[in-house]
Amino acid sequence: VVVFGTTFFNFDSFIGKTDSIEIIGKSVFPYCYHNILPLLNDSGRYSLGDARRPLHETAVLVEDVVHTQLINLLQQAAEVSQLRGARVITPEDLLFLMRKDKKKLRRLLKYMFIRDYKSKIVKGIDEDDLLEDKLSGSNNANKRQKIAQDFLNSIDQTGELLAMFEDDEIDEVKQERMERAERQTRIMDSAQYAEFCESRQLSFSKKASKFRDWLDCSSMEIKPNVVAMEILAYLAYETVAQLVDLALLVRQDMVTKAGDPFSHAISATFIQYHNSAESTAACGVEAHSDAIQPCHIREAIRRYSHRIGPLSPFTNAYRRNGMAFLAC
Amino acid sequence: MASAPWPERVPRLLARRLPSYPPPPPTVGLPSMEQEETYLELYLDQCSAQDGLAPPRSPLFSPVAPYDMYILNASNPDTAFNSNPEVKETSGDFSSVDLSFLPDEVTQENKDQPVISKHETEENSESQSPQSRLPSPSEQDVGLGLNSSSLSNSHSQLHPGDTDSVQPPPEKPNSDSLSLASITPMTPMTPISECCGIVPQLQNIVSTVNLACKLDLKKIALQAKNAEYNPKRFAAVIMRIREPRTTALIFSSGKMVCTGAKSEEQSRLAARKYARVVQKLGFPARFLDFKIQNMVGSCDVRFPIRLEGLVLTHQQFSSYEPELFPGLIYRMVKPRIVLLIFVSGKVVLTGAKERSEIYEAFENIYPILKGFKKA
């Protein structure tokens, strides 16, 4: 998915909030411990300590990217709902948008199933929860799974979507993330580990109302329903995760290894970014040299876009808004 | 079927510490569930004909009785068989014995469970098989359910002559410690886990029982205290009692769900209390198919656990999504238990139908968790 090219992702036109950085439940970068982003909200910044404070610029940039992508995704989903004549954006619309990328769709489905399973278990533990569930009347068990199964059943022409339910392949991306986390946590002491765990638990779904506000769907005619919001929160988290994965790859690439035969082939724009003003600013934060820099993020996004590369005129990624989604 | 009420079966004390329910496999010729149901029905039929608490029952039939019986029977099983029929007639003599020397909780329980004692007596009077279930060595230590108690009952029946006087009190402490040991006949199971001395504590038991009669929920809600009923919201009466602290959902079909108890016996006791309430309101409630549906236990291993390592090595059993739930969900195959493992070292075990499953699951997971101890 990493494509070299010359165009660059123009995100300036989509910048939402810059000053009052109200990032709700900003999910943590659990993948690169040293990049745990601050959780910025009304009550103040939640900083995780000097050595682990990620660059503010990186945080801002990631927030922008995620917000932009989500808004675009929402708009596309709204179009799909309108085609159906529905009044709310349902999870089915989001699943429909994701139908092309099997791996990401599978990850989303797995997430939905785990969510169902977890509710079922937690319900059995606390008697109050059990009562609540009974009182809510409808059969809530496995509701997300049912939604997904029914929908994919209806749109599946070739049987490959339904095959995903039985598919037990290992999700490589997830596997890599797990391994990375394991490697990092092995060397931590218990205080650091406690902190790490806490930050891993941050998610967009915990503060659903703030997430909703941040997304700002008020201008849209069709709004997402509850399960769709859950999925959007998950996709936001996945976007951040993908960005980090890619940025780490980029950073790895940037380190020129002696004897690396391809070091001369790294693209010109890439080097330009690296040598730009940003890096001089970054020099001032030598201590955070292992933090992800905005340039890494930008390069990752640039490479991810389908618009670059020798085959770009022939791909159908020339969507109206030109956005390549990281999450789907 | 009608017979004189049986004296209180203090062997019920053993039953109080039931580690497992339903009864263990009938390798010792324990009665089948159907027979048990019949006894329940018979007993409850009798029960509904009576009113008020039963008079205090004989303390004679302490859990020690089995010991005596064991010795007796070991030497002379035949006489035991023969004496059984006679016992039935004479058992009624022990209806008015003083219970005051028993510890409070026992007496309390006896008062609370007049039903149970009668039930046992019914069971005993009806069953023919108890005779064939004369004690084997392992039976002595049984704290299991109806079967063991009826066994003990049969033991008690078998030596009415001996126990005319009160059993020697010194034996009582033994019986208590016996009952506290919670040992099953099949596997000597102690609540103390051998490896680490940490015992999971039961936190919640969900059980169901069939009252076997159609209920008028509105009438129940109006007449019973601590009952709420909102037909628009949910089609059942929610009733609560304070001792044991539990909640019950009572449906118009007669089925009932009882939650919140901290032990199997408490769950059973609570379910009986609810059944009693329903009975007192005029419905012919019975107590069929009492079944423990789920047991939840929790404990603390007292060291932090590196969940990332655990999820990687036990991928096929675990799922860990910290942004969704802070604990790792571990699906153990044998026994089929779900464990929620937290970074702090707290472990919650759920999905058990028997106490032994919880203990076993914890025994299995403890060495694994030690391997991922976060120094």
Image: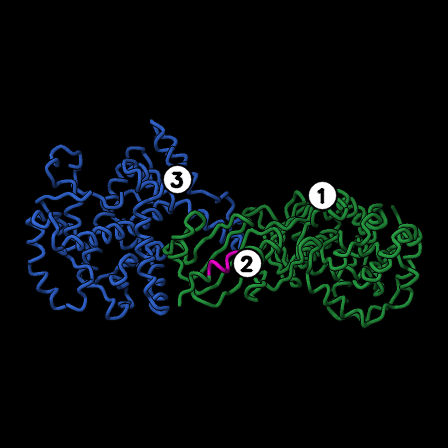
Chain colours: A blue, B green
Instruction: Identify residue type, mark 1.
Output: Cys
Magenta range is B363-369
Q: Is mark 2 on a helix, strand or loop?
A: helix
Q: Marks 3 and 2, how far apart in space?
A: 30 Å
Q: Nearer the viewer, mark 1 or mark 3?
A: 3
Parent chain of label 2: B
Q: Mark 3 points at which residue?
A: A168
Which badge, 1 or 2, comes first in the chain's sequence? 1
| Residue with the mark numbered 1 | B213
Query: Looking at the rendered structure, which numbered label has been put on residue B363?
Result: 2
What x and y, as percent, mark residue A25?
A: 31, 59
SS class, disc 1: loop
Q: Residue at x 56, y 62 (%)?
A: B200
| 1 vs 2, front mark | 2
A85 left or right, relative to B353: left
Instruction: Tell me, yes or no, whether the two marked residues, 3 and 2, touch with CB atoms within 8 Å.
Output: no
Residue B150: give x, y in percent of width and height: 79, 53
Dot label at residue A15 = none
Quarter of image, res B243: bottom right
Identify which residue, B304 or A201, lies in the foreground.
Answer: B304
